[in-house]
C-alpha cells in the first residue's frame, strides 16, 4: 500500500504564494493523487486530481489561484495570492487496494 | 451537482453497533464508488471502506472485522454499520463519492461513543 507524507504545518503571508508537498512512498511514484481542503469546523472539500505527469483537473468552482504540479514522487499544491480563507488543513489522497490519506498540512496565513 | 447527507444517532453506547445512512441527491448512486471516511476529534482522515453500486465492497484492513457497508439503489442510499464500538470510534463520520479519488463529501456527522 502507498504511504503519503505531508509536512505537519506551513505558513505564508497574505497575498503571497505557498507550495504544499505530498510525497508518495517508494514504488508508488506514478500514482495519481487528490488534494482536499478542510477549513476549520467544515467538511473536506475536493480541490483537484493530480497525475504524475503534472496534469491536473480541478473541482468545480475552484479559483485559478490553485494549481497542481508533480516531480517524481512529489505532488504539489500551489496557492497564489493567499487569502485568509485559504487558512485550512490540506490533505492528499491516493488509492491502491485501499484509499489512503496523508497526515495533512495545517496552513496558516499570516 | 451531487449532494450527500449523513443521518443516524449522534450517541452510541460502548459495545453497541454504530449505524449511519447516507442519502445521495442530485445524481444516481448506480455508478461510481461510495465511501465512509471518519475523523477523530483533532486528528486526520481515516478511510473506513467503500461500496460499488453493484454491491462489491472494500474495507480498511484495520476495521474490516467490524464494518459492513451496504447500498440501497432504490432509495439512492448507502449505509455503514460498525460493531462493538469503543471510545476510539468517536469521530465525525463522512460519506463521500469517488471515481478513482474522492470528489464529493457530505457535511459529516459527529458520533460519540459513551455510556
Image (spheres, helix red, strand yellow):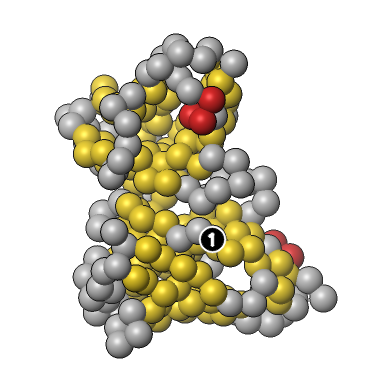
Q: Secondary structure at mark 1?
A: loop
Q: Can see residue B99?
A: yes
Count of marks overlaid on the render: 1
What subunit carries mark 1? B
Tell me if A27 is positioned left or right of A38 in this view: left
Q: In the rendered view, would you say B88 is above or below A57?
A: below
Residue located at (47% from left, 48% from top): A44
Q: In the rendered view, would you say A52 is above or below A95?
A: above
**Other-residue count near label 1 (Cα within 10 Å), few / some / many at <14 / 14–19 / ≥20:** many
Q: Nearer the viewer, residue B46 or A77?
A: A77
Residue sticking out furthest to the right = B115
Residue located at (40% from left, 31% from top): A22
Tell me if A10 is positioned left or right of B104 in this view: right
Q: In the rendered view, would you say B35 is above or below A35?
A: below
Q: Quadrant of residue A81?
A: top left
Q: Quadrant of residue B87?
A: bottom right
Q: Can see residue A74?
A: no
Residue that mark 1 sits on: B108
Quadrant where the image shows the C terminus of chain B: bottom right
Q: Position of residue B46 (x, y in %)?
A: 51, 54
Q: Position of residue A101 (x, y in %)?
A: 44, 46
Q: Quadrant of residue A75?
A: top left
Quadrant where the image shows the N terminus of chain B: bottom left
Amino acid at each position: 500500500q502507498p504511504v503519503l507524507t505531508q509536512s505537519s504545518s506551513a505558513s505564508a503571508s497574505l497575498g503571497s504564494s505557498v507550495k504544499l508537498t505530498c510525497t508518495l512512498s517508494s514504488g508508488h511514484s506514478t500514482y495519481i493523487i487528490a488534494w482536499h481542503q478542510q477549513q476549520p469546523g467544515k467538511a473536506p472539500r475536493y480541490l483537484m486530481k493530480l497525475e504524475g505527469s503534472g496534469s491536473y483537473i480541478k473541482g468545480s468552482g475552484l479559483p485559478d489561484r490553485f494549481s497542481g504540479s508533480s516531480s517524481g514522487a512529489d505532488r504539489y499544491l500551489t496557492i497564489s495570492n493567499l487569502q485568509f480563507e485559504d487558512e485550512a488543513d490540506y490533505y492528499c489522497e491516493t488509492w491502491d487496494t485501499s484509499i489512503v490519506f496523508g497526515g495533512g498540512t495545517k496552513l496558516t496565513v499570516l | 451537482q451531487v449532494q450527500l447527507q449523513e443521518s443516524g444517532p449522534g450517541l452510541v453506547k460502548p459495545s453497541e453497533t454504530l449505524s449511519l445512512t447516507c442519502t445521495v441527491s442530485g445524481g444516481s448512486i448506480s455508478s461510481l464508488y461510495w465511501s465512509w471516511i471518519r475523523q477523530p476529534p483533532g486528528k486526520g482522515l481515516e478511510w473506513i471502506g467503500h461500496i460499488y453500486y453493484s454491491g462489491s465492497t472494500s474495507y480498511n484492513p484495520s476495521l474490516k472485522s467490524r464494518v459492513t457497508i451496504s447500498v440501497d439503489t432504490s432509495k439512492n442510499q448507502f449505509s455503514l454499520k460498525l460493531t462493538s464500538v469503543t471510545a476510539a470510534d468517536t469521530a465525525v463520520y463522512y460519506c463521500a463519492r469517488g471515481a478513482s479519488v474522492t470528489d464529493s463529501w457530505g457535511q459529516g456527522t459527529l458520533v460519540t461513543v459513551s455510556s
